[in-house]
Every structure is written in C-alpha cells, then in structure tokens.
Image (tube, rainbow, N blue to C red):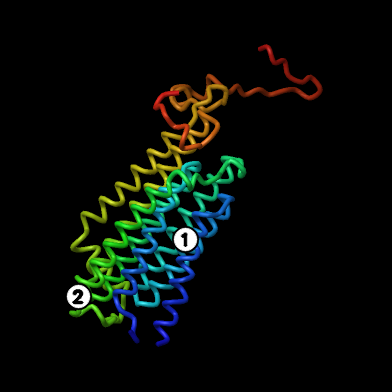
Amino acid sequence: MSSLTYNHFFILSLIVFIIGCFGLFLNRRNMILILMCIEIILLAANINFVSASVFLNDINGQIFSIFILTIAAAEAAIGLAILVVYFRNKGEIDVTKINQLRD
Amino acid sequence: MFLLGTFYFFASFLIFTCISVIFSKNPVNSVLFLVLAFLNSTFLFILIGAEFVGIILAIVYIGAVAILFLFVVMMLDIQITTLMFNIKRYIPLALLFAGVILAEIIYLTVFKSSKSNLSEIVRSSNNTEEIGNVLYTKYFIDFQLSGVVLLLAMIGAIVLTHVYRPSIKRQNIDKQNTTYSKDRIKLVDPKSGEGLNYNE
C-alpha cells in the first residue's frame, strides 16, 4: 500500500473503538473514566463517518458527524451533572458501590 | 507518501493517547490525554480535507467538553490511591470481546473489502460552503432539533445540580412591582445643625 486509503481510517477507528470499550470493561472504580471512554467511542464513530464521507465524496457523513458531536456534548453535560449530584449525596464515585437508586 | 507518513504519525499518537487515558492513575492526566487525543484526530481530519469538522471538533471537544471534565475532576476531589484496576477479574470478558471484534475486523477487511471507488481522496474546493449548503437546506429540521437537544441538556444539567438555599437573600420581584415609591421613600429637608429624627 503506497497511498492513503479508507482501510487505514477504518482500522484506526476500530482500534480506537476497541480501546474505548476496553476502558469500559476494565475500569470499575472511576465513573469519570467511564464517561471519558464513551467520548473515545464517539470519537471513533466520528473518525469513521468523516473518513467514509471524504473517500466516498459524499458530504452527508460530515454532517452526521456534526450531529454526533452535538449529542456527545449533551451527553457529557448530563452525565457530569448526574456525577456531581451523586458525589454530593454519597461522597464517592465508586461504580461498584452504586447499587440503589434512592438515597 | 507524505500523506501516509503523516497519517501513521498522528494515528499512532492517537492510539497512544487513548491508551494513556485509560491507564493513567490520576484523572487529571486522563483528561489532558483526552484533549491530546482530540487534537490528534483534528489533525487527521484536516489531513484528509475535512477542515470544518476538524476545527469544530477542536472547538467543541477541547474547548467545552474536556474543560467541563477538567472542572468536574478538580471539583470532586477523588483519592488517587483508590482508583485501581481489577484486571484479573475482568480480563476473560475483555478477551472475549477483543476476540469478537478481531474476528469482525478480519471478516470485514479480508473477505468483504470493497475495491471500488474507496481509494482516492476527492478534495473539494470549499469544505465549509459544501457543509453549509446541505446542512441548512436538507437537514434543516435536524439542525433545529439538535439545538433543542442542547437546550434540554442545559436545562437538565441546571435542574440536576441546582441547590435551593433558603438562607440566601434574594429580590422578590412580585413584591417589588406591587409597591409604590411614595410608600418606601420619604423626602425630608433637614435644617442645619439639627439632624434627622428617624422615628417620624
């Protein structure tokens, strides 16, 4: 392979996706890291969308990546708000100790 | 060749930063590595000619989301020593997951690889104008709906984190609007050397 092809970006986005999922699987202590892993997974989806859009010469992929960006920002805001409220109630953010919905 | 070398540089740097996000002991380091990962993907997007999305990624993710993470990490005051991995217990699940994904990669890249028009970068003259022409016409309703989603997220975050404290003194707007100035203010003309009697 001498030139840049879509397969490069496809495999890169898969690797980034797997790293994000590994973070979700392996990390059981820190809730902030779970939110960061979700951001990494959405970044992998963005890389796939944008590179496919460029290599197919179809602008719709980049527009969908903008929508993904919007949803990721909203999700981060809501998730961090829930995290702050949980920390205020419990005094810790250990994921293994979240076993009830009420106070 | 220059494109390929630059791609490999930024891609390997991106993978390294993503791994560092997961394996950092300190959450502040994780957030800063996340910023670096977003910056690398911005460079990758600009490399293949998607400048607008790349710059938007830098502005939105690095400027807003990562800084929000940084504020929350600094606010929460987590003990670094308690953040450990429980690798031995979850490594079989992770290996199973990795096996499934690896099988999917091999299946997709070896057996289903398309040799059609996926090999050339088609550079447009003006990426931003192209996006604007489609985003404000074909996806106009979706664009507005994403704004509604952001508004809902903002309201939800404020409602969740807002704490009502009755001890704080606030203005009562209704009470202010229903009074007249002559009930509250009295004009007096004090003579020189006598001062005022406040009880009147």
Where residue B3 sits, quadrant-wise, is bottom left
Percent x, y of residue B137: 20, 63
User: Residue shown at 34%/71% (left/top)?
Assistant: A9
Q: Quadrant of the C terminus of chain A?
A: top left
Q: Which chain's residue wears label 1?
A: B
Q: CA distance from mark 2 to mark 1?
A: 29 Å
Percent x, y of residue B114: 19, 75
The numbered disc on residue B18 is 1
Q: Quadrant of the N terminus of chain A?
A: bottom left
Q: Secondary structure at mark 2?
A: loop
Which residue is at the far top?
Answer: B199
Percent x, y of residue A81: 45, 39
Tell me the amino acid under the disc marked 2: Ser
**Observer-nearest of B35 and A20:** A20
Q: Which numbered disc flags the more N-terminal residue, 2 or 1?
A: 1
**Observer-nearest of B134 and B192:** B134
Mark 2, other Cα within 10 Å: few <14 / some 14–19 / many ≥20: few
Tell me the amino acid under the disc marked 1: Cys
**Residue B168 versus residue B97 in the image, above or below:** above
**Residue that label 2 marks:** B114
Where residue B60 sits, quadrant-wise, is bottom left
